[in-house]
Image (cartoon, rainbow, N blue to C red):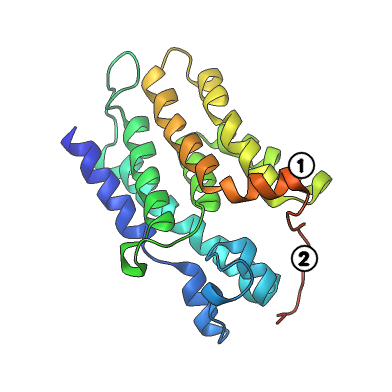
Amino acid sequence: MLMTIWMLLLGYAFGNITTGDIVGKVNHVDIRHEGSGNVGSTNAMRTMGFLHGGLPTLIGDMLKAIIPACLAKFIICRGMPGDAYGLFSTDFYTLAAGYGAVLGHNFPAIHKFKGGKGVASTFATLLVFKFPLGAIEFAIVAVVVAITRYVSLGSILGFIVLPLLTMVFFPGKWALVAATLFYTVLGVVRHHANISRLMSGTENKFHIHSQKTK
C-alpha cells in the first residue's frame, strides 16, 4: 500500500507541470482566460492554433504521464508479480503512477487545484501500461472525433470502454480492472459539462486551425 501512495505522489508531481500554461506564456496567451478556460490541448488548439498551441500541449500532457509510468514500470516497480488479481504488480503500480499524473493535471496544487480533464495523460499512461490497449483507445477516440467532430464524445467513449478492454487484455486481473475504473469515473465526471452540452446540442465541434486565433 505504501508503494501505491508513493507512485501516486510521483505521478502527481509530474502532473502539476501545466503544459497548457507554459505553452500559453510562450505565445503570450493566458489560456485560462481564453476559450473554455481549460488548460488542455483542445482549448490550446482553439486559442493558439494546432502547431502553436494544440500539438505542443498535447505532447507535454502525454509526457508528464509517460515519464512517471515508465519509471514505475521499468525501474522502481520492475518485475513485481503481485497477486493473482494483479494487485501490487508492476502493471498495478504503472496505473497508479499514471493516475497520479492525471490527478495532478486535473487538480494541480500550484494552480489552486484548477486544471484540465486528463484525457491525453490518461491515454498516454495506457500506452505504457499495455501498448495495444492504449493504441485501441487512441483509435476509438480518433474515429469518433473524425465522424462526429466532438472531442468530448470521443474521450468519454474511450473512458467508458477502458475497463472492458482491460478485462479482455488482462482476464481475471480484477485489481487492474478496478484501477482503470478510477480513470473512467474521473474522466466522465470531469466531462459532466460537456455531457450536458452534447445532450442539448450546444457542444463545440473540433476544427484544426494551423494559425493562432484570437
Of the 4 image quadrants, the one containing the C terminus is bottom right
Residue 167 image position (x, y, % from top left): 51, 19
Q: Write down the quadrant of residue 33 in the picture.
A: bottom right
Q: Nearer the viewer, residue 77 or 102?
A: 102
The residue located at (41%, 25%) in the rendering is: 178
Residue 3 image position (x, y, % from top left): 20, 38
Q: Write down the quadrant of residue 82 in the picture.
A: top left
Of the 4 image quadrants, the one containing the N terminus is top left
Question: For the view shown, which residue lies furthest in the left direction?
Answer: 2
Q: Nearer the viewer, residue 163 or 193?
A: 193
Residue 43 image position (x, y, % from top left): 62, 66
Under circle 2, the secondary element is loop
Q: Write down the quadrant of residue 210 in the picture.
A: bottom right
The residue located at (76%, 54%) in the rendering is: 202
Disc number placed over residue 143 in the picture, else none: 1
Q: Are marks 2 and 1 in contact (CB under 8 Å)?
A: no
Count the marks: 2
Label 2, label 1: how far apart the Cα atoms are: 16 Å
Residue 83 image position (x, y, % from top left): 28, 17
Residue occupied by mark 2: 208
The answer to which of marks 2 and 1 sits earlier in the sequence is 1
The residue located at (54%, 40%) in the rendering is: 188
Mark 2 closeness class: few <14, some 14–19, many ≥20 residues within 10 Å: few
Under circle 1, the secondary element is helix
The residue located at (43%, 55%) in the rendering is: 106
Question: For the view shown, which residue lies furthest in the right direction?
Answer: 147
Query: Is the residue 85 above or below the residue 5 in the image?
Result: above
Q: Is residue 149 left or right of residue 48?
A: right
Identify residue type, mark 1: Val
Mark 1 closeness class: few <14, some 14–19, many ≥20 residues within 10 Å: few
Identify residue type, mark 2: Ile
